Image (cartoon, helix red, strand yellow):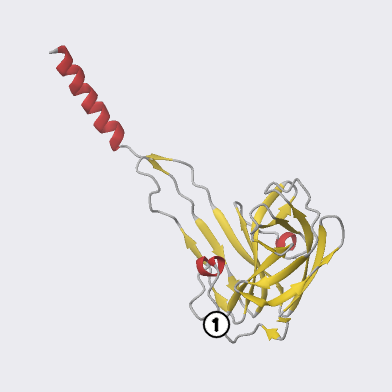
Amino acid sequence: MQINKFFCCFLLFGSVFFSCKFDTEAQNYYFKAFFLGDIAFVAEGEVFRDMDLKTPHDFTSIAAKIYDLEEWEIEGKKTGTNTFSLPVNINANSIILSKETIDIPKSIVINWLGFPDNFPAYEMIFYVDGKKSYDKFHKKGEDRHSMYFIYVGAPIDLSWYDPDDEPKDWFWQYRNPKHYDLNFNKPGWYKIVKNNESMKDNSVYASAKNTFISTFNSF
């Protein structure tokens, strides 16, 4: 009888406990577009071997290409042991980026930013020593934030708020609301920065002269 009472209490406690869902503090993410120029801009920065940006990479060459359009290529200049300067332009090897759609697959970044199919938007990728280096960061003090360079050939506003209400886990209810401030109000080059806090001081981010590249995941 004692065992049955204990078993019943255990079942009651278990049913109440496991029917509860525990909320955790939401982690907000912010994605914001910063205009760099309608035709050209200069990317300057440093190259590192690790994701923590601690180990300088004494690279040999650096270039910029459009995702899946490698004929469009601009070579950069090595300015120090691991520093570079790269003048970007819409015209490279007689291929001019414009409002006319180039028939190439959309990159993952262009896709998840929400650009419609057949829209003239293209991601620029850095190649260090001939290998793709997708990981790019804007560095502010000790903090680093993922960023992307894209060309947009026509105005479009992709701003929206994703409350992320769908549960991620049956037991722990955690959310990652996302704020997309992506108003591409004119054709040109843009820098997209991902941050875990709102980016109110545009002057801190609206430049490509603070570009940190990691070759850790290069291929």
User: What x and y, as percent, mark residue 24?
Assistant: 45, 41
Image quadrant containing the C terminus: bottom right
Of residue 28 and residue 92, the one placed in the foreground of this image is: 92
Q: Residues within 10 Å of mark 1 (few under 14, many from 20)?
A: few
Q: Amino acid at mark 1?
A: Asp
Q: Is residue 159 left or right of residue 151?
A: left
Instruction: Return the residue found at the far right.
Output: 80
Q: Position of residue 13 (x, y in %)?
A: 26, 27
Q: Which residue is mark 1?
A: 103
Considering the image in quadrants, where does the N terminus appear? top left
Depicted 111 relative to depicted 193: above or below? below
Picture residue at 74% right of the left edge, 68% below the top: 63
In the rendered view, would you say 31 is above or below 101?
above
Q: Quadrant of residue 170?
A: top left
Question: Which residue is painted at 30% across and 31% down in the image?
Answer: 17
In the displayed orientation, state which residue is furthest to the top.
2
Residue placed at 59% from the left, 72% from the top? Answer: 183
With respect to residue 107, does 38 lie above or below?
below
